[in-house]
Image (tube, rainbow, N blue to C red):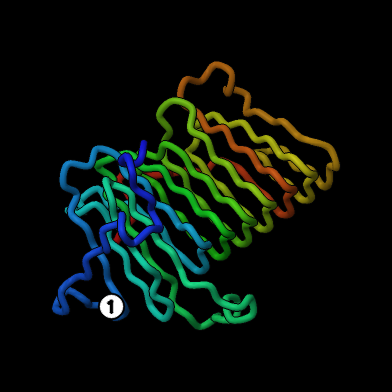
Amino acid sequence: MDEPEGTHPINPRNTIPARRTPLEDREKGGEHFTAPLGSSRNGRLRFTSGAHRVVIQADLHLRGLYRARFENRTPMVGVRGGIVTIRYPRFPNDDWLDCGSERPAEVTLNAQIPWDIEVCGGVSRLLADLRGLRLRSLRLEGGTSRIEVMLPAPSDTVAVLILGGASNVAIRRPEGVAARLRVEGGVTNLRFDDRRIGAAGSELDLKSRNYDRAADRYDVTIAGGANNLSLHELQEMTDSGAST
């Protein structure tokens, strides 16, 4: 989805601050944000300065464009033309990672419209249950660690791109869905469906048996090397969206 002309997602002058939910609607504590769906036909979720300990999910029955809850660390949240931009303040590395008792942030997307999702600046401890979502693309940039992604049924060829290296990443797709996996920069401990590779220093290009014939499929690219990476089918996937 193209951004509105003359706007920038992290410029406060051009981004509409997200609306906090009324006090009586805050059942779980923390800071809550919402925005109306309005006339948006597409959505884009953007983390512009990294993400740590975040849950992303989909809800077909959500009335607004999205809903988000943040606990200890409240980012700047803005919405413009269907683009939800989340920017965390910068923390020292040890402060960013030393928060084992912190509850994860939760971002719920309206599954009635298609979405692009991107995280720039690194991501760790991400659970993305995207079942039921119409996903157009997923991009994680700046290094990823401890990621679990449950993909929905695709429409056309959907790109999943991880840049900057990947460690302890599990990507699951619905049973029978075709996929291609390309890894640049070497890999150790890789699982791709029923294939397992202990170590490979060169570039890998693997396809599921039905990839070339499939119209709806995933094209997954990992650049920067990978360790403990899996891409495989998950049985009994539903298309009803994640429970919220």
Please give the name of the residue rendered at 46% of the width and 69% of the height, measured from the top-left corner: 88
As drawn, 51 above or below 151: below
From the viewer's side, name the closer residue of 234 and 34.
34
> Which residue occupies 51% across, 62% down?
49
Secondary element under disc 1, as helix, strand or loop, is loop
Mark yes or no: residue 239 visible. Answer: no
Please identify the quarter of the rendering in which residue 238 is found: top left
Q: Which sits in the foreground, 164 or 238?
A: 164
Q: Nearer the viewer, residue 143 or 3?
A: 3
Q: Is residue 192 left or right of residue 52?
A: right
Say what amino acid the circle numbered 1 marks. Lys
Q: Position of residue 120 (x, y in %)?
A: 54, 54
Q: How many marks?
A: 1
Q: How packed is label 1: few (under 14 Cα within 10 Å), some, or many (20 or more)?
A: few
Say above or below: 233 vs 179. Answer: below
Kindly tell me whether residue 213 is visible in this rendering. yes
Which quarter of the rendering shows the N terminus? top left
Q: Residue furthest top?
A: 213
Q: Which residue is mark 1?
A: 28
Q: Residue at x 19, y 70 (%)?
A: 21
Residue 129 lies left or right of residue 92; in this view the side is: left
- Residue 98 percent coordinates (x, y): 59, 81
Say whether residue 166 is left or right of residue 244: right
Q: Residue at x 15, y 74 (%)?
A: 22
Q: Position of residue 84 (x, y in %)?
A: 34, 54
Place of residue 28 in the rendered image (x, y in percent of width and height, measured from the top left): 28, 78
**Quadrant showing the C terminus:** bottom left
